[in-house]
C-alpha cells in the first residue's frame, strides 16, 4: 500500500466557462489575483531582471523556462489557481509546455497575427476542436486603453487554419483588444489567432505566461531539467515537468506518476465501474472534464 498522499484536482472550468472557451478560444477572468499576489510576482520579476545581464530597461524582455529560474515561478507549475483548467483538458498526461515572463516598455517589440504552436502543419489538422496547447496569462499591470502593448485576438478563430492577416500587423474587423486591469487571468486556446499592439504609453506591461500541453508533445523551452532542481519540487510539479530520460516515457509515463490528481468530486484515482480489478492504474483511460460534459 502506497504511503503517498495524493491531491484532488484543483478547480477548473465550469460548464459555462468551457462553453465560452470552446466558442471563443479565450477566457478572461478578472480579479484572479489580489494586490498582494500581484506585488509578490512583480518582486520576483524584479529579482529575475536584476540577475540577468541581458536585461535592458528600454527593450522587450521575454525569458523562457522561468519556472526553473526562480522559486516564485516554480510555484506556478501546479498552482491551484489555474492548473485545474489545464488538467480538465489534458488529464493524467498534463505537461508544462513553457513558462515565460514578458516585459514590454514603450516602443518595444510587437508582433503580427499568428497562432501558437506549429505553423506549417497546425495542431488543428490533428485536433480540430481541442487545443493541443493552452496558455495561462497573468496581467500584472493595468492596461485600460489600446496602444499599451495590448494583447489582441480574434474570438472564434481557433476553428480556422487560415487567416487573412497572417504575418501582418493590421487591425481586423471583429478583433478583441484586451484592455484589462491588473490581476486578470487569461486562458487561451493555442489555435486562437492573436497579435500584440505597440506600446505607446509610459506603462511597462508585465505578464507571466505558462503554457500546458499533453505530455507527448515536445517541450518548448527545455530538453531536460537539472536533476538537483527536480529534487526541490513536490510530486505534482515534478510530474508536470515531464523530465524523463527516455523519450517514449512522455507517451507512456512511468506507473509511479499515476494518478497525477484524484478526481476533484469523488476523490477516486480512476473512473469507477469501467475496468475489472487488476488492470494497472497507469494504463487505465480516465475521462477528462470535457468528455464528461459531452
Image: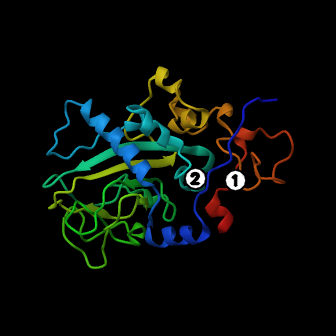
At numbered mark 1, what does the secondary structure look like: helix, strand or loop? loop
Residue 84 marker: 2
**Cβ atoms under marks 2 and 1 closer than 8 Å:** yes
Q: Which of 279 and 73 lies nearest the eye of the viewer?
A: 73
Which image quadrant for residue 1? top right
Query: Residue at coordinates 44% horizontally, 64% vertically from top-left?
Result: 30
* Mark 2 Cα shell of 10 Å, populated few (<14), some (14-19), many (≥20): many
Query: Residue at coordinates 33% horizontally, 51% vertically from top-left?
Result: 207
- Residue 280 drawn at (x, y percent): 77, 38
> In this rendering, does residue 211 appear at all?
yes
* Mark 1 Cα shell of 10 Å, populated few (<14), some (14-19), many (≥20): some
> In this rendering, does residue 215 appear at all?
no
Pointer 1: what residue? 264
Query: Residue at coordinates 72% horizontally, 35% vertically from top-left?
Result: 5
- Residue 40 drawn at (x, y percent): 40, 43
Residue 123 marker: none
> Residue 73 vs residue 237: left or right?
left
**Which corner quadrant holds the C terminus?**
bottom right
Which image quadrant for residue 58? top left
Residue situated furthest top in the rendering:
228
At numbered mark 2, what does the secondary structure look like: helix, strand or loop? helix
Residue situated furthest right in the rendering:
277
> Which numbered disc flags the more N-terminal residue, 2 or 1?
2
> Residue 267 vs residue 85: left or right?
right
Residue situated furthest front in the rendering:
36
> Residue 64 vs residue 241: left or right?
left
- Residue 91 drawn at (x, y percent): 61, 50
- Residue 47 drawn at (x, y percent): 31, 34
**Disc 2 to disc 1, C-alpha distance:** 9 Å
Amino acid at each position: 500500500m502506497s504511503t503517498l498522499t495524493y491531491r484532488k484536482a484543483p478547480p477548473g472550468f465550469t460548464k459555462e466557462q468551457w462553453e465560452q472557451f470552446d466558442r471563443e478560444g479565450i477566457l478572461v477572468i478578472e480579479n484572479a489575483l489580489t494586490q498582494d499576489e500581484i506585488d509578490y510576482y512583480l518582486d520576483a520579476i524584479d529579482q529575475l531582471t536584476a540577475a540577468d545581464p541581458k536585461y535592458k530597461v528600454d527593450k522587450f524582455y521575454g525569458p523562457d523556462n522561468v519556472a526553473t529560474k526562480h522559486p516564485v515561478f516554480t510555484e506556478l507549475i501546479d498552482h491551484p489557481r489555474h492548473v485545474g483548467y489545464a488538467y480538465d483538458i489534458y488529464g493524467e498526461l498534463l505537461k508544462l509546455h513553457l513558462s515565460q515572463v514578458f516585459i514590454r516598455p514603450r516602443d518595444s517589440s510587437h508582433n503580427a497575427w499568428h497562432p501558437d504552436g506549429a505553423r506549417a502543419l497546425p495542431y488543428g489538422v490533428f485536433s480540430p476542436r481541442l487545443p493541443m496547447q493552452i496558455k495561462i496569462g497573468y496581467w500584472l499591470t493595468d492596461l485600460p486603453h489600446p496602444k499599451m502593448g495590448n494583447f489582441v485576438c480574434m474570438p472564434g478563430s481557433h476553428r480556422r487554419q487560415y487567416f487573412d492577416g497572417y504575418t501582418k500587423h493590421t487591425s481586423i474587423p471583429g478583433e478583441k483588444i484586451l484592455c484589462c486591469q491588473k490581476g486578470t487571468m487569461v486562458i487561451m486556446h493555442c489555435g486562437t489567432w492573436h497579435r500584440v499592439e505597440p506600446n505607446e504609453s509610459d506603462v511597462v506591461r508585465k505578464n507571466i505566461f505558462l503554457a500546458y500541453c499533453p505530455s507527448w508533445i515536445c517541450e518548448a523551452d527545455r530538453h531536460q531539467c537539472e536533476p538537483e532542481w527536480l529534487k526541490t519540487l513536490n510530486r505534482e510539479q515534478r510530474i508536470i515537468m515531464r523530465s524523463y530520460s527516455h523519450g517514449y516515457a512522455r507517451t507512456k509515463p512511468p506507473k509511479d506518476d499515476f494518478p497525477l490528481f484524484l478526481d476533484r468530486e469523488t476523490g477516486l484515482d480512476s473512473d469507477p465501474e469501467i475496468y475489472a480489478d487488476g488492470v494497472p492504474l497507469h494504463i487505465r483511460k480516465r475521462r477528462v472534464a470535457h468528455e464528461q460534459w459531452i
